[in-house]
Image (spheres, rainbow, N blue to C red):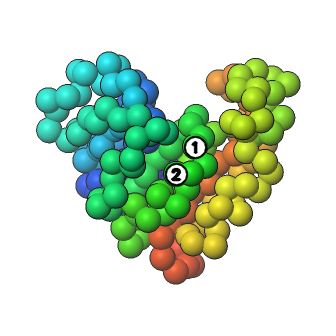
């Protein structure tokens, strides 16, 4: 959430694999229009009729990408990794759109789930995937102790040329 202020105020944000909508709820309550997508949307039913939310049930891994013709001011992906989506995330950002992605990195297998290497990012993998196409504002890879011990990798990047204004939005 610390990178969310980089998203255009009142913009449209896609929350990929949103689960119970932890991020969608905060952003929706902060004035953004949020599109929350997950294979199971039962945890989002209370938002279905809320004016700033669009809830979409979709299998993002075996069905076609449901946002082929849409652009977003922000795309958030947390605790979810499906590498074939990387080009779709880039294409789905409007000019000046912000990608915030955070998931588990290699080394997490010694601390907890996920343990399968297919679901763990290699060091620098997000940079390698996105830096050629987006302006990287922040990148981190390391071990965290709270809320639980985990190895995480995160990236915040903007579609467009840099340098990007980091504060005073």
Label 2 element class: helix
* Mark 2 burial class by Cα count in 10 Å: few <14, some 14-19, many 20+: few
In the image, what residue occupies the spot 39% across and 49% down? 65
Q: Position of residue 54 (x, y in %)?
A: 23, 39
Q: Which corner quadrant of the image does residue 16 belong to?
A: top left
Name the residue beneath numbered marker 1. 82
Give the number of callouts: 2
In the image, what residue occupies the spot 52% across and 80% down? 161
Q: Are marks 1 and 2 in contact (CB under 8 Å)?
A: yes
Gap in angstroms between the C-alphas marked 1 and 2 = 6 Å
Q: Which corner quadrant of the image does residue 157 belong to?
A: bottom right
In the image, what residue occupies the spot 23% across and 27% down? 47
Quarter holding the C terminus? Answer: bottom left
Q: Which mark is residue 85?
A: 2
Q: Which mark is residue 25?
A: none
Task: Indicate left or right for 77 with 38 as reference.
Answer: right
In the image, what residue occupies the spot 48% across and 76% down? 160
Task: Indicate left or right for 169 with 82 as reference.
Answer: left
Label 1 element class: loop
């Amino acid at each position: 959430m610390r990178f969310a202020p980089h998203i255009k105020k009142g913009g449209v944000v896609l929350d990929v694999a949103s689960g119970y909508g932890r991020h969608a709820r905060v952003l929706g309550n902060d004035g953004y229009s949020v599109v929350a997508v997950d294979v199971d949307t039962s945890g989002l039913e209370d938002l279905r009729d809320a004016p700033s939310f669009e809830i979409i049930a979709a299998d993002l891994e075996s069905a076609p990408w449901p946002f082929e013709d849409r652009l977003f001011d922000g795309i958030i992906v947390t605790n979810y990794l499906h590498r074939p989506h990387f080009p779709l995330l880039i294409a789905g950002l409007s000019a000046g759109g912000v990608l915030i992605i955070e998931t588990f990195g290699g080394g997490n297998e010694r601390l907890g789930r996920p343990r399968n290497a297919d679901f763990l990012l290699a060091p620098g993998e997000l940079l390698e995937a996105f830096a050629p196409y987006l302006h990287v504002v922040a990148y981190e890879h390391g071990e965290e102790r709270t809320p639980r011990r985990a190895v995480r990798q995160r990236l915040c990047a903007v579609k467009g040329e840099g340098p990007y204004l980091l504060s005073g939005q």
